[in-house]
Image (cartoon, rainbow, N blue to C red):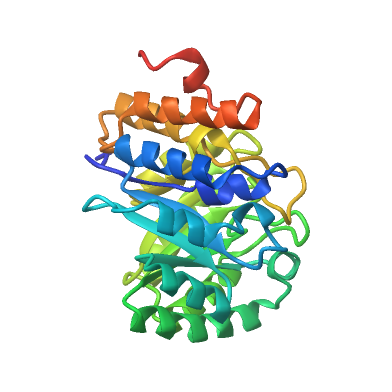
Amino acid sequence: MQWPDYVKIREVGLRDGLQNEDRFVPSQTKIKLLRALIRAGVSAIEATSFVHPRAIPQLSDAEVILEGIGDIPNGVVLSALVGNVRGIQRALETGVREVMVVVSASEAHNRANVKMSVSRSLQALKEISPLASGGGTGVRGAVATAFGCPDQGKIDSGQVSVVVEGMLEAGIREITLADTAGLGHPRQVYTLVKELAADYPEVTWALHFHDTRGLGLANIITGIQAGVTILESSVGGIGGCPAIPGATGNVPTEDLIFMLHSMGIRTSIDLEGIVCCTRLLEETLGRSLPARVSHLGCQR
């Protein structure tokens, strides 16, 4: 088959990763890590989340992070998660260039995660999206539990399509399929991506895999074979999901880069720079993170 020459990696460790940490990471440390990721060549970074501070105390410093980072190099896009009108209002005040909204394909997970039904979450998108567009901020979406839910079980493509169509109605054209619980497998990934790409050709697709059952990189390979060239990962493999006990982090960024570079696929990211970011994060958290390349070395 024909492999792509280039794959875009979106770093989600600062948002999806840190949100699961009980011990508050100082704002200046987050800014230091954000700057280190940019120096390493990461051009797309989920920096934080504009949710209620009581919901995720770790990310209660969203304004401090986005205002404290200073000038962003050309070509680098920082984004933030928002969940409601108040969230997008806060985000717009910081001048962030892109926001992300999440709706689960699983009714059970959506209620556990955001305390709303799927239909109510989709209605909220129609309130959020115009505010973002009016403020000159881009909006992209993510379908959580697109490959399975521990509470609800199997998720079929029709359930995913309901969320995709709701996002399209809200004007969203880039959508991430997220394996929030790490239940997906390569055959399922290939089948779902090909089906959705055929049904919704106007959508730019991205993939987001948690490595809970060790299938993250295998799923990514299959996703690339199905035509996806935007992938999300987290530095060091940090992460989890507050609404899914036992969920581990995303595919580690350095492991993903090592695999892609070994295959001759460019990413624009310096692998050694990412390893340095992981070491900084491990020093901050006081523990080792799951990434293999950071501990085994970068040489092939």
* Number of marks: 0
Residue 222: image location, x then y, percent: 43, 42
Question: Which residue is pictured at 35% across the width and 73% down the height?
Answer: 137
Question: Which residue is pictured at 50% across the width and 73% down the height?
Answer: 90
* Figure check: 64 above or below 168: above
* Figure check: 40 above or below 59: above
User: In which quadrant of the rendered view does residue 129 lie?
Assistant: bottom left
Residue 80: image location, x then y, percent: 47, 61
Closest to the observer: 156 or 72? 72
Closest to the observer: 106 or 102? 102
- Quadrant including the C terminus: top left
Q: Is residue 290 visible?
A: no
Residue 133 vs residue 117: left or right?
left
Residue 224 vs residue 90: left or right?
left
Question: Which residue is pictured at 25% across the width and 35% down the height?
Answer: 266
Question: Which residue is pictured at 70% across the width and 76% down the height?
Answer: 116
Residue 85: image location, x then y, percent: 55, 81
* Figure check: 19 above or below 91: above
Closest to the observer: 108 or 46? 46
User: In which quadrant of the rendered view does residue 35 lie?
Assistant: top left
Q: Is residue 87 visible?
A: yes
- Quadrant including the N terminus: top left
User: In which quadrant of the rendered view does residue 150 lie?
Assistant: bottom right
Residue 271: image location, x then y, percent: 35, 27
